[in-house]
Amino acid sequence: MSITLPTPQDTALLMQDTTTKTASFNTTALDLGSGFAPGGLGTPVAAVVNVTAVDTSSGNETYAFTLEESSDNVTFSAAGAAQAVTATGGFAVRGWLTSRYARLALVVAGTTPSVTYKAWLNPLP
């Protein structure tokens, strides 16, 4: 059995400290700075999401995280595909950022949804 250890996370890139959510939610945007302008297709990143609790007791709960971006911190659009979560553990929500602001969107549904998580933004090599 192999074990994957996550890389150390940069506290300056914390997107969401540990929280429990029972409804859809958007994190506060992370400001990458006025000079952030990767050009072209953008820069590959991932939101590393550590899920420590997830309710699937009714069997109809769903959870999906999407990395979003904005140039004005008002209007956001998806920067990658949604990542469904069905169990506890670490998950990478991948995307390509071309804009200054980044946030993580959570969409939940079902009878008794509840998810506890913490998330960071990580640049990809």
Image (cartoon, grey):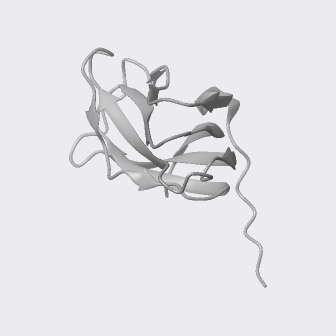
Q: Residue furthest bottom?
A: 1
Q: Kindly identify the residue that appears in the image at 33 percent across and 16 percent down.
A: 73
Judge whether 109 appears above or below 87 on screen. Answer: above
The residue closer to the viewer here, 91 or 101, is: 91
Horizontal side of residue 27 vs 117, given as left or right: left
Judge whether 69 appears above or below 4 on screen. Answer: above
Q: At which x and y percent is residue 114?
A: 60, 38
The residue closer to the viewer here, 114 or 123, is: 114
Horizontal side of residue 71 vs 55, given as left or right: left
Q: Residue furthest left?
A: 40
Q: Kindly identify the residue that appears in the image at 62 percent across and 58 percent down.
A: 87
Q: At which x and y percent is residue 98?
A: 28, 37
Horizontal side of residue 111 vs 43, given as left or right: right
The residue closer to the viewer here, 52 or 59, is: 59
Horizontal side of residue 102 vs 87, given as left or right: left
Q: Quadrant of the N terminus?
A: bottom right
Q: At which x and y percent is residue 115?
A: 61, 40
Q: At which x and y percent is residue 35?
A: 36, 22
Q: Kindly identify the residue that appears in the image at 49 percent across and 25 percent down.
A: 27
The residue closer to the viewer here, 22 or 4, is: 22
Q: How many marks?
A: 0
Judge whether 31 appears above or below 107 on screen. Answer: above
Q: Kindly identify the residue that appears in the image at 46 percent across and 27 percent down.
A: 25
